[in-house]
Image (tube, helix red, strand yellow):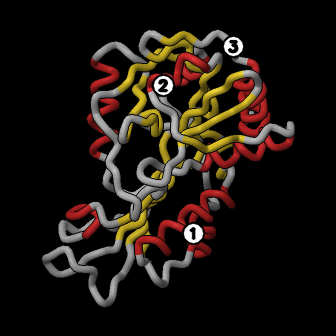
Amino acid sequence: MEFITEQNNISLSPQDRGLLYGDGFFTTVRIANHQPVFWPLHQQRLVNSAKRLGFSDFDVTLLDSKLDDLPVQGILKIIVTRGEGKRGYAIPATSLYKCIIQVTDLPDNRNILTTALNLNISNVPASKNQLLAGIKHLNRLDNVLARTAALNAGFDDGLMMCDGNVISATQANVFFVTDGKVETPRLTSAGVEGVMKKQVIDWLSEKAIVVNETDISEQCLGKYDEVFITNCVMGVSSVNRVNQFDFTNHIVTDYLHSKFQSIIQ
């Protein structure tokens, strides 16, 4: 595997399959106190993605030596592509994988992530494919279109649907709470299994709260009194409204937000 960083001046070939076909996967990591937060979970995500996409000899341990000089705070993005190949979709018999390591500052809009958000139901559906569901692969055009549409319409984000059921926000998993019970969309046909989603489920289990993964239609939204979205950059953010539905409680969200803040400070 060949690494591409800002320091080594190696560039990505125009023939790279990640560029040509989206043939690859990635993970986005919060950096706190010079360390990649939830790193074991991100490692497992990379390993699982490589296995499902047929990156047969991918070795995640090679990354460890590349993460020795991280800033105090920031965002680490790790992108793995299958590398160069002959023209055509078929996977090459041999591949030199490329691993792009990007380190950037935290976004300037962090302040909005500590306030409750206003979402819409996106008219851009989440792509349905059971073979790719759960993987953070490089084909993200549906998210690009849905995110842009939500912001242009004056919303903080949008909920993407598939077959009439909620899948996720454009760049976050979503959870719904009613009477102390927590539910999150089932992601067997679409969506991304987030690292922060898994961490939230683990934190809730410490409070003896079991998260039910199930189908959630737009018509069901009125029964919930609390909604929050999660990803590894922002952590946990409350949702005030989705279209005409208002959510006034933030009890579970506040607990999870405090857990995340205790780790990144």
Give the label, 3 or 2, closer to the camera.
Answer: 3
Q: Secondary structure beneath disc 2?
A: helix
Distance from the alpha carbon under mark 2 to that under mark 1: 28 Å
Pick the front one: 42 or 54: 54
Amino acid type for the residue under numbered disc 1? Leu
Q: Going 52% across and 40% down the picture, which residue do you hit?
A: 215
Seen in the picture, residue 1 relative to 73 is either above or below; the reply is below
Q: Which mark is residue 108?
A: 2
Q: Secondary structure beneath disc 3?
A: loop
Marked residue nearer the N-terminal end (3 or 2): 2
Amino acid type for the residue under numbered disc 3? Asn
Marked residue nearer the N-terminal end (2 or 1): 1
Pick the front one: 120 or 54: 120
User: Which residue, given by chain and number where applicable, does mark 3 sit on?
Assistant: 249
Q: Residue furthest bottom?
A: 93
Seen in the picture, residue 134 relative to 178 is either above or below; the reply is below
User: Which residue, given by chain and number where applicable, does mark 1 sit on?
Assistant: 63
- Assess whether mark 1 and mark 3 are in contact (beta carbons under 8 angstroms): no
Quarter of the figure that contains the C terminus:
top right
Q: Residue 173 location, x and y as percent?
A: 53, 38
Q: In the picture, residue 239 is in which quadrant?
A: top right
Distance from the alpha carbon under mark 3 to that under mark 1: 41 Å
Q: Residue 205 location, x and y as percent?
A: 81, 43
Pick the front one: 125 or 111: 125
Residue 45 showing in the rendered view? yes
- Assess whether mark 1 and mark 2 are in contact (beta carbons under 8 angstroms): no
Mark 3 neighbour density, 10 Å: few (under 14) some (14–19) many (20 or more):
some
Q: Residue 165 location, x and y as percent?
A: 43, 36
| Horizontal arrangement in the rendering, residue 119 relative to residue 127 (left or right) | right
Give the label, 3 or 1, closer to the camera.
Answer: 3
